[in-house]
Image (cartoon, rainbow, N blue to C red):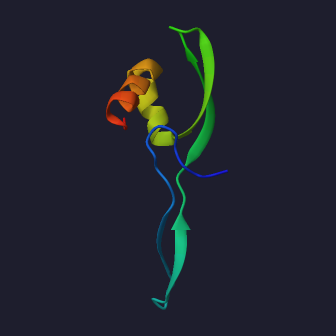
Amino acid sequence: MSKICDLTGKRAIKGHKVSHSNRKTLRRFKPNLKTKRFFIPETEEWITLKVSTSALRTINKKGITKVLDDVIKYGWI
């Protein structure tokens, strides 16, 4: 199962882990994803999305229907 946010498209990125001796080794920065069920009042159905916690904050602020409309319209939140 891929670690990609369904709404924002956030995914893992690469970077360096830097030790005390300044030695650099590659590592991955994974997004903070949660699997969450949302209720759509217009259609009266539940949907399950894998969203990042920053997207959850936006959903709490704007509402799930507005966020889904923005994703459909613009491709992002």
Q: Residue at x 51, y 41 (%)?
A: 53
Left or right: 60 as drawn, with respect to 3? left
Q: Position of residue 47 (x, y in %)?
A: 61, 24
Left or right: 70 as drawn, with respect to 50? left
For residue 37, above or below residue 8: above
Residue lying farthest to the left in this orientation: 74
Q: Residue at x 52, y 39 (%)?
A: 6
Image quarter in which the C terminus is found: top left
Left or right: 74 as drawn, with respect to 26? left
Q: Position of residue 38 (x, y in %)?
A: 58, 22
For residue 4, above or below residue 66: below
Q: Position of residue 36 (x, y in %)?
A: 62, 31
Report how many numbered discs are placed on residues in the image: 0
Q: Residue at x 45, y 27 (%)?
A: 59
Q: Nearer the viewer, residue 29 or 74?
A: 74
* Residue 72, picture quadrant: top left
Q: Nearer the viewer, residue 26 or 74?
A: 74
Q: Residue at x 51, y 59 (%)?
A: 12
